[in-house]
Amino acid sequence: MAKQYSILAIDIGGTGLKAACIDRDGNLLADRLRVSTPYPCPPNVMVEALVSLCEPLSGYERIAVGFPGVVRNGHILTAPHFKDPAWTNFPLAQALSHALGGHPTRLVNDAEMQGLAGVKGKGLELVLTLGTGAGTALFREGDLMPHLELAHHPIRGKKSYNDYVGDVARKKIGNRRWNKRVQKTIEILDSLLHFDHLYIGGGNAERLDFDLPSSVSTISNDAGLEGGAALWKLDPEDHEDPASAKGATRHRKPAAKHAASAVKQAKASPPTKPAAKKPARSR
């Protein structure tokens, strides 16, 4: 029988930061916590905000984080919402692990985190998140595919997916026109990828007011936290004792003072260009 453990799941968004403790099957062990995303938001501000958010939570042995940008090997390659060069190649997984008790930490794109909780492992499955911006994640037979940052790819004229169906556009043009844009986006993604199923998540998924095709469905916004369990099942390390997993130390209650030293320590690490990682199974 697999050893039971709890995971601190963190969902970083352009509008809000969310956290909750989940079990190894992705079930929330208590109500999630949420605060607004601070701006301006360089890495040290983000780490401090997350430490403060997570302070009431305890008892977890692993950490899973979803971030709105390109992520590789625990480093942030792009952080479009935060527009600060300090994010480039920042080792966020290492910084959060240090600030939150030294627990082993995994970091993925936020749309991938949602997808890990929602996909069925059948055929080509696409995740589209509609929140502050637009995010995507692609899975084939349950395998997480290399990340495609479609959010910044042109979809109409000079407009990117973010510009076209992001929250700024929705507020500017209204829900009716925004819904028509989402319909058009679904058609474009289908013609581009010929997906077997599309899952739509994010805070604005609840604003959809048209009948979805049979190959499209919505997923809970809590999937951005629940996917942290599947993230820790991507390889055999899932069956290790968390106390002996790489990077683990005895848990200490997080405090804001740890954030500054965590960022300082992370910055002191020699910057490396993360190597591309092979797709891993989510089942």
Image (tube, helix red, strand yellow):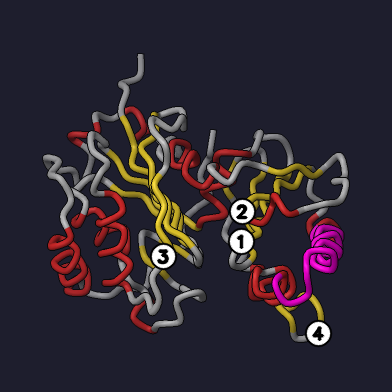
Element on which disc 4 rests:
loop
Q: CA distance from mark 2 to mark 1?
A: 5 Å
Amino acid under label 4? Gly
The reply, left or right, for residue 85 in relation to residue 139 is left
For the C terminus, the quadrant is top right
Which circle's residue, 1 or 4, is located before the other in the chain? 1
Tell me which corner region of the image, top left, top right, bottom left or bottom right, holds residue 135. bottom right
Q: CA distance from mark 4 to mark 2?
A: 25 Å
Disc 1: CA contacts within 10 A as few (<14), some (14-19) or many (>=20): many
Residue located beneath label 1 in the image: 131
Residue located beneath label 3 in the image: 275
Amino acid under label 2? Gly
Q: CA distance from mark 4 to mark 3?
A: 33 Å
Residue located beneath label 4 in the image: 157
Which circle's residue, 3 or 2, is located before the other in the chain? 2
In the rendered structure, which segment of residues is drawn in magenta?
171-189
Element on which disc 3 rests:
loop
Query: Residue 204 in the image: x percent, y percent?
Result: 66, 56
Q: CA distance from mark 1 to mark 4?
A: 22 Å
Residue depth check, mark 1 versus mark 4: number of the one nearer the observer: 1
Element on which disc 1 rests:
loop
Query: Residue 90 in the image: x percent, y percent?
Result: 33, 71
Question: Magenta-highlighted stretch: main secondary structure?
Answer: helix
For residue 180: magenta?
yes
Disc 2: CA contacts within 10 A as few (<14), some (14-19) or many (>=20): many
Residue located beneath label 2 in the image: 202
